[in-house]
Image (spheres, grey):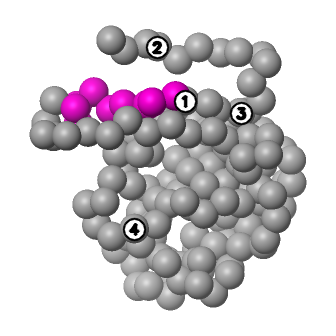
Amino acid sequence: GYSRPRYSPQVLGVRIQNGRHPLMELCARTFVPNSTECGGDKGRVKVITGPNSSGKSIYLKQVAKAVNNATAQSLVLIDEFGKGTNTVDGLALLAAVLRHWLARGPTCPHIFVATNFLSLVQLQLLPQGPLVQYL
């Protein structure tokens, strides 16, 4: 019942309808499919917050593609950036990396970030605008 990803020149970004993670479906009693859109008026940077075991990493993995060089057509997945560093340093590094890509404006890569650094949102460390959405 799975379908492989398809490239469509009409879609500027990433669109997944009822995305599933095959291994999680085998291991979990219940799995809720997740749809996602990135690009256009849906923003290019997705910051996913939530407690441990809430599904942030699985959400990223079901969307994942390999990335060598981030371009406007790239999909960048960041899972628990700064884990193992102290909170202030990890938060500062994460904000700096995201601000670097956001400075590119419309040529910013498509980015999904799963983090426990809720301070990224609370302290408004990212510029506000159409490129960033909080999930």
According to the picture, the residue beneath numbered tag 4 turns out to be 50
Q: Single out the mark in the foreground, 1 or 3.
A: 1
60 vs 17, nearest the viewer: 17
Going 41% across and 63% down the picture, which residue do you hit? 80
Is 103 inside the magenta-drawn segment?
no
Disc 4 and disc 1: Cα gap in Å?
21 Å
Q: Residue 68 shows which numbered tag? A: none
Q: Single out the mark in the foreground, 1 or 2.
A: 1
Mark before the other along the chain sequence, 1 or 2: 2
Q: Residue 4 shows which numbered tag? A: 2
According to the picture, the residue beneath numbered tag 1 turns out to be 16
Specify start and end residues of the magenta stretch as a single range: 17-25
* Residues at circles 1 and 3 in contact by the CB criterion of under 8 Å: no
18 vs 57, nearest the viewer: 18
With 118 as the anchor, is 75 left or right in this view? right
Q: Residue 13 shows which numbered tag? A: 3
Disc 1 and disc 3: Cα gap in Å?
10 Å
Residue 113 visible at all: yes
Mark 2 closeness class: few <14, some 14–19, many ≥20 residues within 10 Å: few
Disc 3 and disc 4: Cα gap in Å?
25 Å
With 124 as the anchor, is 19 left or right in this view? left
The image shows residue 64 at horizontal and vertical percentages of 47, 36
The image shows residue 103 at horizontal and vertical percentages of 83, 61
Disc 2 and disc 3: Cα gap in Å?
16 Å
6 vs 96, nearest the viewer: 6
Say what secondary structure mark 3 lies in: loop
Q: Amino acid at mark 4?
A: Gly
In the image, residue 52 sits, relative to residue 101, either above or below, namely: below
Mark 4 closeness class: few <14, some 14–19, many ≥20 residues within 10 Å: some
